[in-house]
Amino acid sequence: MAMLAYYHGNPQNALQALIIAIACAVLPFLWEVLRPMPLPILFNRRTRELYFEQDGKLYHSPWDGIAAAAYSMNTVGPYTGRMGHAALEVLLHRYAHPEEQVLINLGSPLGKSLRMQLGFWEYLRAYMDNGPWFDEEGNTCESPVFNHSMLEVRKRRGQWARLQWRDIKNQYRANNGRNFLGADDLVLLIGGIFLAPMNAIQNLTYAIAKRRSRSRWPELIRERLEADGPTSRLVDLEQHQAG
């Protein structure tokens, strides 16, 4: 809008539009990337542990004998009707304070089914028990091809448009170039192109959050994330301290 106003010889309107754009887009973006972000849930294969941080408190659980629960639920609203959800939760306790426990959700329950949550837990189990590389059946594998294919699901800059363009080309070949293009294909392709800048900003914010999160973990966790770091579990340290 600012560029359009400036092109038509209205520098004052262009300046106003630019100020509004900065206030609505740049400032929220800086707030998102500069403010402290919640740390991710960590699965450490070397020590076979699960780490979680909340309000400066460190929670953990050994993978062997971990307690997990998956369940489904339904909500009914006057405007949304019936909606199904499912949750996958694990029980952790605070480091050096085993009497303090917390139940964390491994993913947002919205829009998920019980089958999806059970499949996700099986994926985590295969990573911890058979990883780092495993095949479609969860068995130990020397090739990282399957794991890399799972990472490709992530949204990347312009990926929506590329995926839709690939589908259009597949339909073109399948129908020999006749009656292959529908209105929904055109809408999804244009929508993917239109949303590409939003996806790029989202991916940049996520990348910054990942880089910053590693340095914000306590030293006790950071050293266990190193390839040559200690392999002792936090639960073992607690027992040693108590003894």
Image: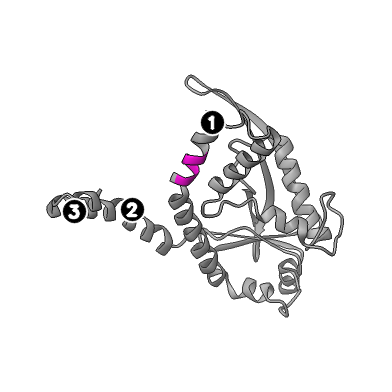
Q: Does the magenta stretch include residue 191?
A: yes
- Predominant SS of the magenta segment: helix
Spatial separation of the CA atoms under disc 2 and disc 3:
20 Å
Q: Tell me if residue 204 can be seen.
A: yes
Instruction: Assign a secondary structure to mark 1.
Output: helix
Q: Which amino acid does label 1 sit on?
A: Asp
Q: Which amino acid does label 2 sit on?
A: Ala
Q: Does the magenta stretch include residue 172?
A: no
Residue 81: give x, y in percent of width and height.
Answer: 54, 21
The residue beneath circle 3 is: 6
Residue 128: give x, y in percent of width and height.
Answer: 78, 59
Q: Residue 184 carries which label?
A: 1
Q: Which amino acid does label 3 sit on?
A: Tyr
Residue 196: give x, y in percent of width and height.
Answer: 47, 50
Q: Sequence-wise, which precedes: disc 2 or disc 3?
A: 3
Query: Quick one: quadrant of the C terminus?
Result: bottom right
The 10 Å Cα crowd at callout 3, few under 14, some 14 to 19, many 20 or more, is some
